[in-house]
Amino acid sequence: RAKSRGRNSIHYFTENMSTDFLKRMEIMRDLRTAVEQKQFYMVYQPIVNLSTQRISKAEALIRWQHPHKGMISPLEFIHVAEEIGLIVELSEWIFNEVSQQVNSWRKRFCPELTISINTSPVQYKNNGAQINAWADSLLLRGIPCEAISLEITEHLLMENQLEAVEALDKVRLHGMSVAIDDFGTGYSSFAYLKDFDFDFLKIDQRFVQNMSADNKDTALCEAIIVMASKLKMSVIAEGIETEQQKQLLIKAGCTFGQGYLFAKPLSVADFEALLVEQNSTLIVSESIKGKN
Ligand code: C2E
Ligand code: MG
Ligand code: MG
Ligand code: MG
């Protein structure tokens, strides 16, 4: 019986592999058209200051609305775009979208708003030509570089460390901030912290989501927060879904949080509504203060 189950599971495995393979091939084929036809849009997930509840940051996340297949997750297509070299062109579109959006929101609702963009390893090739062009483009349009933050994962640093570090050093000089994303999930996180000055450290959601009183995940989060503060980085905890996780993170001294407890990634209109609401409650609380 074990034998036949074994055979079935092999059969199942190869079948799975070939559907995965076909799926990838389709994504590869459709992605080129998608980039040409701009089948993408950006959503914005608020990043909240845990002690004041204020939103002054957000992460921009891409969405692909396929004309026949519906929504395709970035987890399925970003790495394909990286492999076939489309990511540079796609990221150019992302940067243009996000920079216009943050500029408009800064002017109308929130002057200190910073929006972060996820970046891929290839964007740091050629001495970070693309990233440097972004800094120039912001300066040219009178958008402060502080309006944009770049998120990078440890994978990026693994692939081309020296080039990446030099490119990031340059953009930081212009005032763009840099965040290490999904911290704790790569191979040698600590070595990267030694070689580069990040402004923000984002604790990966797999630690945050398993936090409960006195468990290992909570201990790890606490340790990461202490370490980050010694290295002068601000911490953003990703994937906060419960009030308990939030309270444990506040107790551990975490400054910022992101997750479904506060908001899912939002459309432009919904994010804007949130900024409007935040401003009106601010005016109310200030006028109350004024009366006292
Ligand atoms: P990431 O940069 O770590 O982004 C956070 C992911 O966690 C997002 O998934 C977000 O929707 C999800 N998330 C946020 N809060 C919660 C929560 O409370 N619970 C749970 N379960 N999930 C939460 P998303 O949008 O599917 O993006 C997945 C990944 O795809 C991103 O991970 C990032 O690596 C990549 N990605 C997304 N947009 C872009 C982009 O514009 N450019 C590049 N290069 N990569 C992108
Ligand atoms: Mg990210
Ligand atoms: Mg992340
Ligand atoms: Mg991630």
Image: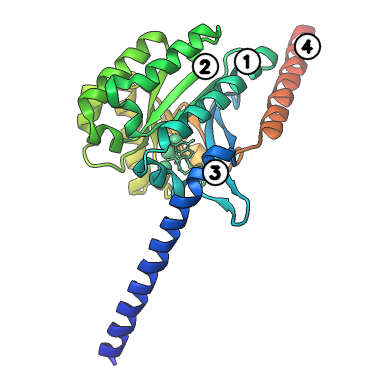
Residue under label 3, please give it.
Answer: 34
Q: Secondary structure at mark 4?
A: helix
Instruction: Report whether 176 appears left or right of 197.
Output: right
Q: Quadrant of ligand 2?
A: top left
Disc 4 residue crowd, few under 14, some 14–19, many 20+, Cα 10 Å: few
**Which is closer to the viewer, label 1 or label 3?**
3
Q: How far apart, in angstroms, are the residues tagged by discs 4 and 3?
A: 49 Å
Upstream in the sequence, badge 4 or badge 3? 3
Residue drawn at (69%, 29%) of the image: 274
Residue under label 2, please give it.
Answer: 147
**Residues marked 1 and 2 touching at CB (< 8 Å):** yes
Residue drawn at (55%, 10%) of the image: 143
Residue drawn at (54%, 43%) of the image: 34
Q: Which mark is residue 106?
A: 1
Upstream in the sequence, badge 1 or badge 3? 3
**Which is closer to the viewer, label 1 or label 4?**
1
Disc 2 residue crowd, few under 14, some 14–19, many 20+, Cα 10 Å: many
* Image location of residue 206, percent across then percent down: 40, 47
**Which is closer to the viewer, label 3 or label 2?**
3
Upstream in the sequence, badge 1 or badge 2? 1
